[in-house]
Image (tube, grey):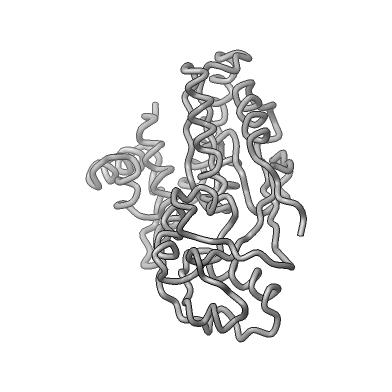
């Protein structure tokens, strides 16, 4: 029989493509990760090809990955059946992008206070990883910024979220020159978001790439820290701005036209949501006020 821990190690290694990162995620040593893979390969044959560009699965590796995902799906269905239809008990797993994640996390904590029997597991991830996690049963619920067309997913509107131009408090922005003077605080989606919003707000501008970049962070909760200190401006989603703990230090530059994104709720289509998932979705939707369309 294959040990579940070996299978979890193999799956993490395939997902991350790196022994070091797999060991960090699983809280193991690299030697332990290697040993788990050796145990599997001793039983099943070669599973991975170590290439200069990364790891590549052999046919046996693809078969084992499919097996692991089928086992996860069966395990999830079993846990849902054993938990019954009790909305106050059991595990709820969800995965979301950063901005909406910041908005919903306090409400998830409040829900767990009301129902201590709930165990809520929330991960932050980009949309591509959200879709993959729901498809492969690593999360019951996902929220994505793009609508997937995969027939294995049930997709519904969750919320709408505007992009915002945020500057230090007291700063006025009358034109593109003011943004050039301030400088741009970038983030992983910053160039795309700024291009989408500023191309509409300031038509004919020379482009975001021409702006002086005064900072960068990949932590969504920290993007506005340098803005609040007067070090530049940024463009980010509304929910991320609303979660910033020092609103008095920043200012949203209002204007038209705007850009409003749709957030999509995802879950596997083959089985209905658990009662606890339905309760969480109803609670979260009631707490979030959608932005009007642009």
Residue depicted at x 54% and y 49%: 242
Residue depicted at x 68% and y 42%: 289
Q: Is residue 260 left or right of residue 139?
A: right
The residue lying furthest to the front in this view is 170
Answer above or below: position of 158 versus 20. Answer: above
Residue 15 coordinates in the image, percent (x, y): 45, 49
Residue 26 coordinates in the image, percent (x, y): 33, 40
Residue 264 coordinates in the image, percent (x, y): 68, 46
The quarter of the image holding the C terminus is bottom right
The quarter of the image holding the N terminus is top left
Residue depicted at x 47% and y 24%: 119
Q: Is residue 89 left or right of residue 219?
A: right
Quadrant of the rendered structure where residue 17 is?
bottom left
Closer-to-camera residue (172/27): 172
Closer-to-camera residue (160/8): 160
Quadrant of the rendered structure where residue 143 is?
top right
Answer above or below: position of 148 versus 84. Answer: below
Residue 67 coordinates in the image, percent (x, y): 52, 36
Q: Is residue 34 left or right of residue 244?
A: left
Residue depicted at x 28% and y 46%: 34
């Amino acid at each position: 029989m294959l040990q579940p821990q070996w299978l979890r190690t193999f799956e993490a290694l395939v997902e991350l493509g790196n022994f070091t990162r797999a060991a960090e995620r699983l809280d193991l040593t690299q030697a332990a990760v290697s040993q788990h893979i050796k145990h599997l390969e001793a039983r099943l044959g070669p599973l991975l090809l170590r290439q200069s560009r990364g790891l590549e699965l052999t046919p046996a590796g693809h078969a084992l990955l499919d097996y692991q995902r089928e086992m996860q799906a069966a395990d999830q269905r079993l846990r849902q059946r054993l938990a019954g239809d009790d909305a106050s008990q059991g595990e709820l797993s969800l995965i979301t992008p950063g901005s909406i994640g910041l908005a919903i996390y306090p409400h998830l904590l409040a829900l767990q206070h009301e129902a201590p029997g709930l165990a809520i597991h929330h991960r932050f991830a980009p949309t591509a990883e959200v879709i993959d996690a729901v498809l492969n049963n690593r999360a019951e619920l996902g929220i994505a910024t793009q609508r997937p067309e995969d027939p294995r997913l049930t997709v519904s509107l969750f919320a709408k979220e505007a992009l915002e131009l945020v500057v230090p408090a007291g700063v006025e922005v009358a034109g593109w020159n003011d943004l050039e003077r301030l400088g741009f605080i970038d983030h992983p989606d910053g160039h795309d978001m700024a291009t989408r919003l500023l191309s509409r707000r300031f038509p004919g501008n020379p482009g975001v790439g021409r702006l002086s970049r005064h900072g960068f962070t990949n932590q969504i909760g920290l993007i506005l820290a340098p803005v609040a200190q007067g070090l530049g401006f940024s463009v980010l989603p509304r929910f991320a701005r609303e979660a910033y703990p020092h609103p008095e230090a920043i200012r949203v530059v209002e204007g038209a036209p705007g850009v409003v994104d749709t957030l999509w709720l995802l879950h596997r289509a083959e089985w209905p949501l658990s009662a606890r998932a339905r309760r969480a979705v109803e609670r979260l939707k009631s707490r979030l006020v959608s932005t009007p369309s642009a």
